[in-house]
Amino acid sequence: MKHLFTLLLFIPLFGFSQMALEQQLDSISTSDEATSFLKENKPKQGKLFTFNKEKHKTRLANDLFNLSKGGKKVIRTDFKKTYYKVIDKAEVDYIKFNIIVIDASKTTVEEAIEKRDKVLAQYKEGYRFKDLAKHYSTGRTAKKGGDTGWIKAGEMSAAFDEVAFNENHAIDDIFSIDDIENKKYYLAVKTENKTPIEEIVVLKFSENIE
């Protein structure tokens, strides 16, 4: 009987804590507020995610894209309750490139540029860019033939953005980028024009159910 009484006392307290948490989540409207919330409330149980409509095709992502800004989805299991709140929603410009990265960190700049010129000459002779990327590129996209997928300004270096995003390149134009600060020398081909893609910033927070 004593244990039952203790349990009955605990249930309202648990319900109150759940309500307080939901009220906190409802009050969050910016990424800065979400970051502060995570710092104050067990950051290991929460995270801010960015979902891109072209990159993320899961059922969860689809459900979240169907929510309006400020919308919330709750998934409950026997042991955990997970909240997903859409903090921001916008269309962001993305472009696709194929790139070859020549790393000058373990060689001289002159040797890196000479190697890039050699690759460019082979491309002009008719070699496929993706084959050259697989053979010569030191970047993480090499195995995919240099394909970056959809990327936005800020994902690469400032030097890359300055040339690739801010200059007017036509589809299939090949151009070079010198990222002197990071000792990387690129050959790049734009494969898709600038395209607005819907993107959402989502706050995820999980709470154990005891």
Image: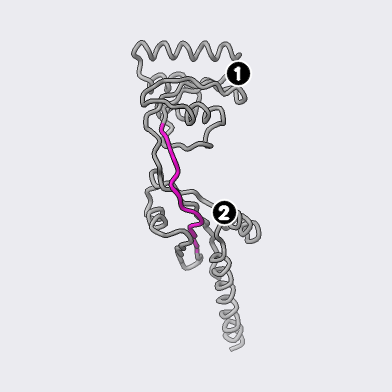
Q: Position of residue 184 (x, y in %)?
A: 56, 23
Q: Quadrant of the C terminus?
A: bottom right
* Image quadrant assignment for residue 188: top left
Please name the amino acid that badge 2 sits on: Ser
Front residue of 47 and 168: 168
Vertical order, 204 against 99 (above or below): below
User: Mark 2 to mark 1: distance in Å?
Assistant: 39 Å
Q: Which residue is mark 1?
A: 106
Q: Position of residue 137 (x, y in %)?
A: 47, 22
Vertical order, 192 against 106 (above or below): below
- Disc 2 packing (10 Å; few <14; some 14–19; many ≥20): some
The residue segment tinted magenta is 82-96
Main SS type for the magenta part? Answer: strand
Q: Nearer the viewer, mark 2 or mark 1?
A: 2
- Disc 1 packing (10 Å; few <14; some 14–19; many ≥20): few
Name the secondary structure under disc 2.
Answer: helix
Residue depicted at 43% across the width and 27% down the height: 168
